[in-house]
Amino acid sequence: MADAQPVRLLRISREDETATALLGLSPEETVEALLNQSGRFTASRQLAELAQKNPDQVLNCLPLLVEQCPPYWDGWGGLADLTKAERADRIVAPITQFVQNHEAHIADTLLWALANLVRSWGDRAAGEEALRPSFLGLWERLWQAALRHREPALDLDPLDATINAPGGILAETITDLVLALPEEPGQAVQPYWEMTIEGEEEAHLHGRIIAASRLLWMHRMLPEMTRQALLPRMMATHAEAPGLWKGYFWGRHWDVPLMQELVSAFLSMAGHFQNQDCTEAWNQMFADILVEAPSLVAKEAINRVMRNARAEDLRTMAWHFSQRLSGAEEKAGELWVTAIRPIIDKTWPATIAQNTPEVASALVQMALHCGPHFGDAVGILVRRRLLRPLGRHHGLLHDLE
C-alpha cells in the first residue's frame, strides 16, 4: 500500500514553440509579438525560451508587458524559466524592483511564476549570506501579494492545493530556508517564517500545512511556535485538522519527544478521516507507535482504538506489522516476542465483524514473517479464534505453498 504522493501542477505548456524570431527585438516589439500570439500557451512557451536565452531582454520588457497584457494572460507561466538562465542570482534585484513598482499587478499566474522563481533560489539563499537580504526582501513582497491572492476552486485535496498555490510555494521556500540555516542566521529568518503561520488568510493555512509536513524538524528547532501555532490546530475539533494531518502524513516523521506532545491530537483523529490515504497512514503510524513506543499511549486509549477499528483498519495494521517483521530479517523473532506478540495476544479485537477473511489473511501473512516463532504466532491466532475461512483461490494459499 504505497502512500499517494502530492501532485505539483504545471501551469505552462511544453509545446515545441520557438522564440528565435523574438531574439534581439526592442521591448516594444517583444511585447507586441508575445501579446499577438494566437495559439494557447504559445506566448508562455516563447517567454520561457526567451528567459533562458536572453534574460536581459525579458527583464527589459517586463514593465511594458505588465501594463499592456490582458487580465489573466496565460503567458506569464513562462517567466518561471528565468531560473534556468546563467547566473540567475543577478536577476533577484531587478525582479524585486519590478515587483515593487507593479505590486498591484502581481497576481494569478504572474504571482505563481515569481513564487517559483524565488523557490528556485532557496538553496542559494541558504548558502550565500550576501544574497540573503535581497532574497528575503523579494520573498516578503511576494508574500504580501500571496495574502491577497485567492486560488480558483479546483478539486484538489488540501496538500495538493497548498503545494501548487503561490502562498504554499512561498511558505515551503521560507520553511526550508529556516531549517537549512545554522542557529544564528536561522533566527534572523524566523520572523519571515512566522508570517506564514500566524494569520487566517488562505495563504496562512497553506503555510501551516507546509509546516506540518516538516513537523518533526519544526518541533526540534522552533518548539514554542510549533506548540502555539500548529499542535492545537491538529486536534480533531479544529477545522484545519484534516489539512494539517494531510501535510504531516506527507513526511510522517516522528520521535518520542514530538509524539509525547502530539499523541492527544493524534488519537483524537481516530476514525475521523474522510481521505483513505490519511486513514491508512494513521493506522500504520498507530501500529508503529505500538511497536516502538507503546508507553506513549494509555492502555485504555489503545483498547478504545482497537474496539472501534473497522475491518479495513485492522487489515492495514496487520499488514504493517507484517512489513515490520519482514524488514527486521534475522531480528524478526525478537520483534515478534517483544513488541507485536503482546498486541495480538492481548489487545487485538476478536469480534467476527472486525476479523474478516481479509484481516485473517493479513494476520497469517504476519505470522509467516515471524521466523522461528511462526508456530507461536499461529497458535495465538487459533486460540483467539482470529482465523477465518478463505476462498480456494485466495492469494495467501500460494504464499503458504
Image: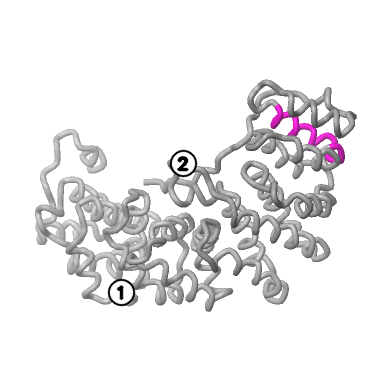
Amino acid type, callout 2: Leu
What range is drawn magenta here? 43-57
Q: Earlier in the sequence, mark 1 or mark 2?
A: 2
Q: Is residue 334 visible?
A: no
Residue ID at (74%, 57%): 138
Badge nearest the viewer, 1 or 2: 2
Q: Is residue 27 above or below residue 212?
A: above
Residue ID at (34%, 61%): 332
The one nearer the camera, 310 or 161, is: 161
Q: How many marks?
A: 2
- Which quadrant would residue 231 be assigned to in this image? bottom left
Q: Quadrant of the C terminus?
A: top left
Residue 18 image offset from top left, x and y in percent: 76, 24
- Which quadrant would residue 322 be assigned to in this image? bottom left
For label 1, the residue is: 297
Looking at the magenta stretch, what is its main secondary structure? helix
- Between the residue at mark 1 and the residue at mark 2, the CA separation in whole angstroms equals 38 Å
Q: Is residue 171 visible?
A: yes
Residue 149 image offset from top left, x and y in percent: 58, 51
Q: Secondary structure at mark 2?
A: loop
- Whether residue 257 sits left or right of residue 389 in the image: it is right
Amino acid type, callout 1: Val
The one nearer the camera, 108 or 248, is: 108
Would residue 64 be counted in the magenta stretch? no
Residue ID at (78%, 65%): 133
Q: Secondary structure at mark 1?
A: loop
Q: Which mark is residue 154?
A: 2
The one nearer the camera, 303 or 72, is: 72
Residue ID at (54%, 61%): 204
Give the colour scheme shown: one colour
- Which quadrant would residue 384 be assigned to in this image? bottom left
The one nearer the camera, 305 or 385, is: 305
